[in-house]
Amino acid sequence: MTATATRPPAAPTSGPPRQPRVISFSQRLSRWDLKVSPYLYISPFFIMFAIVGLFPIAFTAVISFMDWDLVRNSGEFIGFDQYAWILGQPQFWTALRNTFSIFLLSSVPQLIAALFIAAMLDRNIRAKTFWRMGVLVPFVMAPVAVALIFSNMFGDNHGLVNNVLADIGISPIPWHKDPFWSHVAIATMVNFRWTGYNTLILLAAMQAIPRDYYEAAKVDGAGAFRQFWSITLPSLKPTLIFVIITSTIGGLQIFDEPRMYDQFGRGGAAQQWLTITLYLYDIGWGQWNFGRAAALAWILFLIILIIGLINLLVTRRLVRDEGRR
């Protein structure tokens, strides 16, 4: 036999009904400020990007489908004829080959060297601030100055490198005549400028890795190489993706170094180091055909997009996530 307890009814409340709370104008303004102010703070960037970035991109896309007259600032719609003309030129495929060759010769050694230098700077060495500042010095140098110095170093007749090779009994290298060696020389300029920049980015990511991981690895008997392979590389996955994508964008848009490699800036007598950006510059400002130049710019954009996506997929597969086995 069970007994159920009944709850006594609540006593009725006495007094006047409670008045609803009135929100003042200052409180509403404070709420609006809390919601709207973050967007106002970041709006200058997006406004400037829309003016100097998004509008030129859209305008270039429109011009690429037109036979544009720069004098009258108008054009006639011709569809994909500009793209077909670009793809039908042998110079485009030569420039594409040269661009990919310089890109591979610069980006791959550059990232390997940046990883190695960042790993050395991450260790407990003396004068760490001095060495970290030192790797960034080439990046702050003017690209034109770097190109002029290295173009003289890689001179065919009286260059510093060929003089050193002659002193040790090696025949001189045709830096400006042979396509491969000209690509090596230009890639050396790119590596000199950008290795330190990528090193500092990777170093910042390495310093964000918890030190507990390395201490536990030392207790387990893991050496320096094993720690780097099993802890450092997996933890650097987001940073490596960023560095690889930015290196891809910069490598495929290379302009300053091949432009200043000789006194003419046309990519060589036989187009040995003609790149896509040099070819684009020649079409736009040499031939004054901005419709074809715009079409080539969009072709380059699509190439960079495809290569960037391939790099993203490959990097995600090769570099494991932190803690994954």
Image (spheres, grey):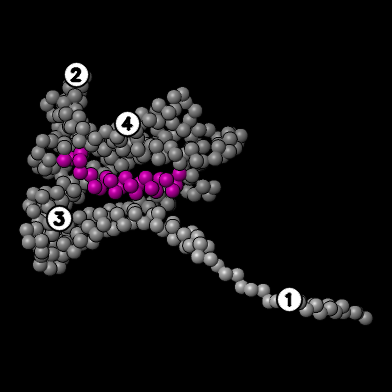
User: In the rendered image, is residue 176 in sight?
Assistant: yes
The amino acid at mark 2 is Asp
Which secondary structure lies at badge 2?
helix
Q: Are marks 3 and 4 in contact (CB under 8 Å)?
A: no
Q: In percent of the image, x 27 and y 45: which residue is there?
A: 251
In the foreground, 269 or 179? 269
Instruction: Give the label, 4 or 2, closer to the camera.
Output: 4
SS category of the residue bearing label 1: loop
Find out whether residue 239 is within the magenta segment.
Answer: yes
Q: Which callout, 1 or 4, points at the residue further toward the start of the chain?
A: 1
Residue identified by numbered label 4: 137
Quickly name the residue at label 3: 293
Q: Which residue is mark 2?
A: 167
State how far apart marks 4 and 2 are (Cα): 30 Å
Find out whether the residues at labels 3 and 1 contact each other: C-beta distance under 8 Å: no
Query: Where is mark 1, residue-wise?
Result: 15
- Judged left or right of residue 146, residue 118 is right
Give coordinates of residue 264: x percent, y percent: 9, 38
- The CA span between labels 3 and 4 is 35 Å
Relative to 20, residue 264 above or below: above
Q: Residue 243, position in %: x, y?
A: 37, 45
- N-term mark: 4 or 2: 4
Type of amino acid at the residue the image marks with label 1: Gly
Q: Earlier in the sequence, mark 2 or mark 1?
A: 1
Specify start and end residues of the magenta stretch as a single range: 236-259
Amino acid type indicated by mark 4:
Val
Among the two numbered marks 3 and 2 on one chain, the one whose residue lies closer to the N terminus: 2
Q: CA distance from mark 3 to mark 1?
A: 82 Å
Q: Is residue 180 visible?
A: no
